[in-house]
Image (cartoon, coloured by chain):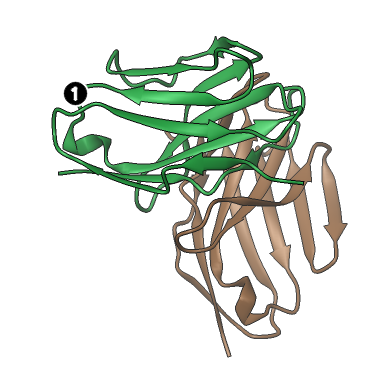
Chain colours: A brown, B green
């Protein structure tokens, strides 16, 4: 079992709709969770971090965390073509090490 | 201010050669990380520096890989006797103190191709 699992996609969503990205992790002791966006040929860019159970909203992005289920999700409202990218779920497994999922490719179709 | 920089941006080498990849972190950041990203995968942790010392090198795949950060700023990842399987994007990231949960800022990466 991978430490951080994501559906590789591609996930195709019409422009203006809600995109829902999911991630599960195996280390119950993890306390910090991140979503990075990575455009093709570019480096990862942090878009959301979440540390407590529940929802965290930032503009069109909402991160959701359920530690009991070991589940993290990212919702993107009013999806735009510029949101087309690979979204990486990342989990702090220790004081210094981030474990990344393999990413979900998101495609927003006009 | 300037972000994390990495040089070279691209490196092509032949199997068996030695390569050095350089990372210049954000000024004042004490924590520095190296990752490797293969096509279609997420970044894979290699090594973490806190200041000049390697706090965690558990991700280095074998003894052909070595990294240094002699003055607590710039870091160099060194790969000896390169193999075709070493081809990947090598990413460097830095964070202010290395505290758990702190944001890591990534550089643009070095694309290494071993022929």
Q: Is residue A1 above or below residue B31?
A: below
Characterize the local packing of mark 1: few (<14), some (14-19) or many (20 or more) Cα atoms within 10 angstroms. Answer: few
Subunit ID for the residue under disc 1: B
SS for callout 1? loop
Q: Looking at the rendering, in which quadrant would you find the C terminus of chain B?
A: top left
Q: Is residue A13 above or below residue B68?
A: below
Q: How many marks?
A: 1
Q: Is residue A17 rendered to the left or right of residue A11?
A: right
Q: Residue furthest bottom?
A: A110
Q: Is residue B52 rendered to the left or right of residue B1?
A: left
Q: Which residue sits at x=76%, y=51%? A: A64
**Quadrant in the rendering for residue A52:** top right
Residue on which the image places disc 1: B81
Front residue of B86/A55: it is: B86
Residue A27 visible? The answer is no
Residue A35 at x, y percent in the picture: 66, 50
Residue B6 at x, y percent in the picture: 51, 41
Residue A34 at x, y percent in the picture: 68, 43
Q: Is residue A10 above or below residue B44?
A: below
Residue A20 at x, y percent in the picture: 65, 65
Q: Which residue sits at x=76%, y=27%? A: B28
Front residue of A50/B28: it is: B28
Residue B82 visible? The answer is yes
**Quadrant in the rendering for residue B99:** top right
Front residue of B52/A72: it is: B52
Q: Is residue B36 rendered to the left or right of residue B80?
A: right
Q: Which residue sits at x=54%, y=13%? A: B56
Q: Is residue B30 rendered to the left or right of residue A26?
A: right
């Amino acid at each position: 079992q991978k430490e951080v699992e994501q559906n590789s996609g591609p996930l195709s969503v019409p422009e203006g709709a809600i995109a829902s990205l999911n991630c599960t992790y195996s280390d119950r002791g993890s306390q910090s969770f991140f979503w990075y966006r990575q455009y093709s040929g570019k480096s990862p860019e942090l878009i959301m971090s979440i540390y407590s159970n529940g929802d965290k909203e930032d503009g069109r992005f909402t991160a959701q965390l359920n530690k009991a289920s070991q589940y993290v999700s990212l919702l993107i409202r009013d999806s735009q073509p510029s949101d087309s990218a690979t979204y990486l779920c990342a989990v702090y497994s220790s004081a210094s090490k981030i474990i990344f999922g393999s990413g979900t490719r998101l495609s927003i179709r006009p | 201010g300037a972000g994390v920089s990495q040089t070279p941006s691209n490196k092509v080498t032949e199997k068996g050669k030695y390569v050095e990849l350089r990372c210049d972190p954000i000024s004042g950041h004490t924590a520095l990380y190296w990752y490797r990203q293969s096509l279609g995968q997420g970044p894979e942790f290699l090594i973490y520096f806190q200041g000049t010392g390697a706090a965690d090198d558990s991700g280095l795949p074998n003894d052909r890989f070595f990294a240094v950060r002699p003055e607590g700023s710039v870091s160099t990842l060194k790969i000896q006797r390169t193999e075709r399987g070493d081809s990947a994007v090598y990413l460097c990231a830095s964070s202010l103190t290395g505290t758990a949960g702190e944001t890591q800022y990534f550089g643009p990466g070095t694309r290494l191709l071993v022929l």
